[in-house]
Amino acid sequence: MRTKTTLINPQQIFSKGQVAAGLTPPLGVAYLASFLIGNDYPVQIIDALGEDPHEINSFEKGSFLRGLKVSEIIRRIDSDTNLVGISNLFSFAYPAVEVLCQEIRKAYPEKKIVLGGPHPSALYDEILKNVPEVDFVAIGEGEESLLGLVNYLDGKLELNELSGLATRDKSGNIIVLNSSKRIKNLNQDNIPFPARHLLPMENYIQAQEGHGPSSGRWTSILSSRGCPYGCTFCESRRTVWIARTPMDVVDEMEYCLKEWGINEFHFEDDNMTINKERLIGICDEILDRDLNIKWQTPNGIRASVTDSEMLTKMRESGCLHVTLAPETGSERVLKEIIEKGKDFDLAQLKDCGALAHNLGLKVAAYFIIGLPGETRSEVQETINYAKELAKCGIDEVAFGLFIPLPGTPLWKVAKKKNQEMDFLDLLAVGDMNKAVSWNDYMDAEELNSLRLKAYIGFHLTRMIYHPLLFMKSFFNVMRNIEETKTERTLLQFIKHFGIKKKSTKKTDIGLASYPYDSSSTVKTILQSKPHYAYGHSLLKTLRFWKKETFNSKN
């Protein structure tokens, strides 16, 4: 019998100030499954988050787990499974993953456990040293490493023939089994499309909780891997960028359209605009096939290579929403701390955002505040720059507090300041009610105040310079429409806190299951406690606006 693998997408972890952190199909797990299936190995996927997104349980330090209980995950592991693989994308999720490993080992002492994802890849030595339940850690891309591992468990390979894996030798010493090589061919003739048929796709589609705003039947998709730029906070920095062909990408889009009726795609590439010719090729392929689809780039596009021709073609082929990632409004922070690249220019990004806005695209911008070495005046530069973006038509912003990611240059800087890193503290990146500071000049409380000031400043500026757009966003929420992440956040807020459900069935997930009376919505929004990063700022602005309007009438 061939080695059987159970792949687990663990529960989602979040803090009270986040409440909802998105619900996106685990493409990494689905790619691993399809690669094993393509090599004639049996696979089971347990998607703890997707299979029961309604299940919420408390965890540690005021955090919560969303998804199947650990006991239920263990119950669902097939008895004939030989290898359990667990995905760990985010460092703040690692404490829950560690608990899951321990409980699986208690229940199934004979099964091997392998961890994969950005966090284990960066800290494989610490994990193997401190967590005896973990037998292997996959370093980097997992497809070929995992295939080699199941071949080893099948007796087809020797341990020293494996690559891209860390483990322990017979003496308990941690060893890395040959360095892994990047997969050069990502097209379906080598890496099959993700095994979405093993995921609860309808739950994801109906939940409408993607990284970007959703208005139809949607899924995430990946057209490339890696990023050649050197941002010091990023796990993907200076990795070789490898892309699929336009035909292969659109083949997957067309397959999803036919198989699940999916007509909206969220590209999860670190940066899909690196090669202009390829991106225009994707657009042309969509247009040539006359596919009636929509798409967006929630992770960001590179302003230095994004011109009028590219944006026009993107819009014509169904792109509705793009994200820009200036990270800061300070030239010094950009060059000396983030090291974003010589070709990156804040004025050029502003022009790119204005151009996208004028073409009818919705535009978001991402910022980070509280970087090590960043000063108060430089945070103010970021706030001022965000206001300039508001003036030129940018629809929304996200101000995340800096968190150090393992394996990055800024992780090493942060570790020098705080040797005892608590990964749950990293939840502060998107929690409006808490903060942690790795900054030399500002404590957590001040950073949180500056973040709120930044949000309010952006929305007030947008309201003054683009009052019609501001009001359109407000009335979109009244009509249960989401064109931006801010609108999606407010709709989620209303769904979770403002409006009672008509049904308590567990199948009632997604915005469509929560109809509401718009006459009570304004009062609900203005009086409720905010819990979302995007929505928090808009709620504060609405309260300010309401107060000023009342005062002007009296």
Image (spheres, grey):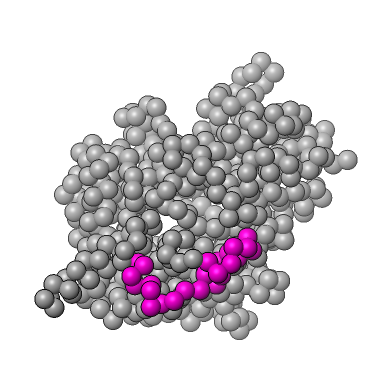
Q: Nearer the viewer, residue 525 or 360?
A: 525
Please provide percent x and percent y for residue 56: 55, 49
User: Where's the N terminus, which quadrant?
Assistant: top right
Please tell me whether residue 57 is drawn above or below residue 279 in the rendered image: above
Q: Nearer the viewer, residue 101 or 38?
A: 101
Q: Nearer the viewer, residue 434 or 151?
A: 434
Please tell me whether residue 446 is drawn above or below residue 440 in the rendered image: below
Q: Quadrant of residue 370?
A: top left
Q: Nearer the viewer, residue 435 or 419?
A: 435
Question: What residue appears at the point 38 percent right and 78 percent down from the top-left corner?
Answer: 519
Question: What residue appears at the point 46 percent right and 42 percent down from the top-left corner?
Answer: 63
Please provide percent x and percent y for residue 96: 55, 38
Q: Is residue 43 left or right of residue 357?
A: right
Q: Quadrant of residue 382?
A: bottom left
Any part of residue 366 in sight: no
Please provide percent x and percent y for residue 160: 71, 28
Q: Is residue 399 left or right of residue 134?
A: left
Question: What residue appears at the point 51 percent right and 52 percent down from the top-left corner?
Answer: 226
Task: Check the image and name the residue furthest to the top.
Answer: 171
Any part of residue 516 in sight: yes
Q: Is residue 496 left or right of residue 182?
A: left
Question: What residue appears at the point 51 percent right and 78 percent down from the top-left corner?
Answer: 318
Magenta segment range? 501-525
User: Where's the C terminus, which quadrant?
Assistant: bottom left
Please provide percent x and percent y for residue 496: 47, 61
Q: Is residue 276 left or right of residue 265?
A: left
